[in-house]
């Protein structure tokens, strides 16, 4: 049997109320946003020929950036979320291409999904009409009244915890959603709507790495399950002489208060220290090795551009930035009013959220060349994590 094309709807529009802060799909899991784990898995699944990401409209820019980084060969679309999950999925289905025989639904808050599981669930749906990833219930389940009184104890040998992905022959899913809308029915998962119509649903055994992130404890538990604890640390240092004839650029931001710094590029000492720290963590040498001051193509180049190139070098080596902390040593300028802008520019170059980048400054109390204004120095500490986990395809 040939493998059909799948359109995957990834639901990333939840309110994150129980997570304690908005945007849990953007929380970092081993240095990578939760949503990006799901996007990467779908990009690696050869059956998935289209992805529809359903998200909150204010998050569209973040989603756009993550999708552009992960879905490099898979076409994708954005659909605005609804009042609840069911309405969000319904809106996503409106954006699905017309020629897809199978539709897969996945909750972005389940980052442990793999390409192999997506494919397995889709192939089962091709045969039976509908399939759901899940795992056997481990605990005894009791049915209780609202006041807590137990009505009965369920036989857990027949109980499974439903998860996602859930895949369906497209016509079944569309019919189920149309009937649910007409009758005002609400179900907590898509398979429930199809089951109500009398169609069979196949359960596909997965493991608990597909658990849904609801609270911060779930995020920590999943990191333990996935074995994502590998972190490498690098240190960077840079120094540049000052010159009143040069423009001053720090962290990708131009300061009118001089003096500037002398260098082959724009001499951004903050970005250079950061680049060395990242390269060092990946054992890739230093900034001079990759961007030598003898190469005319780097003359006057923006160091933010170089920092983006460093992120690309890390990716080629199988790593991605996780966090960055830079300290500038200079008598002036006062960078505090523009630190947020500096963090944003550097984070964007590295594919990080702003809160993963720290920039601060101190003086040397008039001591030494930096204290006399003859130079500026920067120290940086960077952490990187594996781009993908071994064996997770």
Image (spheres, grey):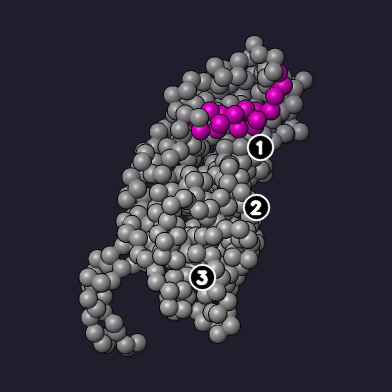
**Which residue is the site of mark 2?**
61
Q: Secondary structure at mark 1?
A: loop
Q: Residue 334 bears which disc, if any?
A: 1
Prevalent SS, magenta region: helix
Q: Are marks 3 and 2 in contact (CB under 8 Å)?
A: no
As for residue 313 lying within the magenta part, the answer is yes
Inter-mark Cα distance, 2 to 1: 31 Å
> In the image, residue 45 lies at what x, y percent?
47, 47
Marked residue nearer the N-terminal end (2 or 1) = 2
Q: Is residue 289 magenta?
A: no
Q: Tally the numbered discs.
A: 3
Real-space CA distance between mark 1 and mark 3, rounded to the nearest whole angstrom: 63 Å
> What's the magenta region?
299-315
On screen, 251 above or below 174?
A: above
Label 2 sits on a secondary structure element that is helix
In which image quadrant can residue 143 be found?
bottom left
Residue found 58% across the figure and 61% down from its top: 54
Q: Element under label 3?
A: helix
Q: Earlier in the sequence, mark 1 or mark 3?
A: 3
Structural crowding at the residue carrying mark 2, measured as other residues with C-alpha within 10 Å and reported as few (<14), some (14–19) or many (≥20): few
Q: Nearer the viewer, residue 177 or 98?
A: 98
Question: What residue is disc 3 on?
Answer: 172
């Amino acid at each position: 049997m040939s493998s059909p094309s799948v359109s995957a709807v990834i639901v990333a529009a939840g309110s994150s109320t129980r997570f304690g802060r908005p945007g849990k799909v953007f929380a970092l899991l081993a240095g990578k946003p939760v949503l990006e784990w799901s996007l990467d898995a779908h990009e690696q699944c050869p059956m998935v020929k289209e992805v529809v990401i359903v998200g909150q409209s204010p998050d569209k820019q973040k989603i756009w950036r993550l999708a552009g980084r992960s879905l490099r060969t898979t076409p994708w679309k954005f659909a605005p979320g609804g009042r609840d999950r069911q309405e969000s999925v319904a809106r996503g289905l409106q954006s699905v291409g017309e020629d897809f025989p199978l539709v897969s639904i996945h909750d972005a808050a389940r980052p442990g999904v793999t390409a192999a599981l997506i494919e397995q669930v889709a192939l089962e749906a091709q045969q039976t009409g509908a399939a759901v990833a899940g795992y056997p219930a481990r605990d005894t389940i009791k049915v209780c009244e609202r006041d807590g009184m137990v009505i009965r104890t369920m036989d857990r040998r027949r109980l499974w915890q439903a998860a996602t992905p859930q895949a369906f022959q497209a016509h079944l899913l569309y019919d189920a959603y149309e009937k649910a809308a007409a009758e005002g029915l609400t179900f907590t998962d898509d398979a429930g709507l199809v089951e109500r119509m009398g169609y069979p649903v196949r359960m596909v055994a997965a493991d608990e790495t597909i658990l849904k992130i609801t609270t911060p404890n779930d995020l920590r538990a999943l990191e333990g399950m996935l074995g994502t604890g590998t972190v490498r640390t690098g240190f960077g240092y840079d120094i540049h002489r000052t010159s009143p004839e040069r423009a001053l650029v720090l962290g990708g931001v131009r300061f009118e208060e001089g003096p500037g710094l002398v260098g082959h590029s724009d001499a951004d000492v903050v970005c250079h220290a950061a680049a060395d720290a990242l390269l060092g963590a990946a054992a890739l040498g230093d900034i001079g090795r990759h961007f030598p001051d003898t190469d005319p193509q780097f003359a006057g180049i923006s160091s933010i551009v170089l920092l983006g190139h460093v992120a690309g070098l890390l990716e080629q080596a199988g790593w991605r930035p996780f966090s960055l902390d830079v300290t500038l040593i200079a008598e002036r300028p006062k960078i505090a009013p523009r630190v947020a802008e500096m963090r944003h520019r550097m984070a964007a170059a590295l594919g990080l959220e702003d809160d993963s980048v720290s920039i601060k400054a101190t003086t040397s109390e008039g001591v030494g060349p930096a204290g006399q204004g003859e130079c500026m120095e920067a120290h940086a500490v960077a952490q990187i994590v594996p781009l993908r986990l071994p064996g997770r395809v």
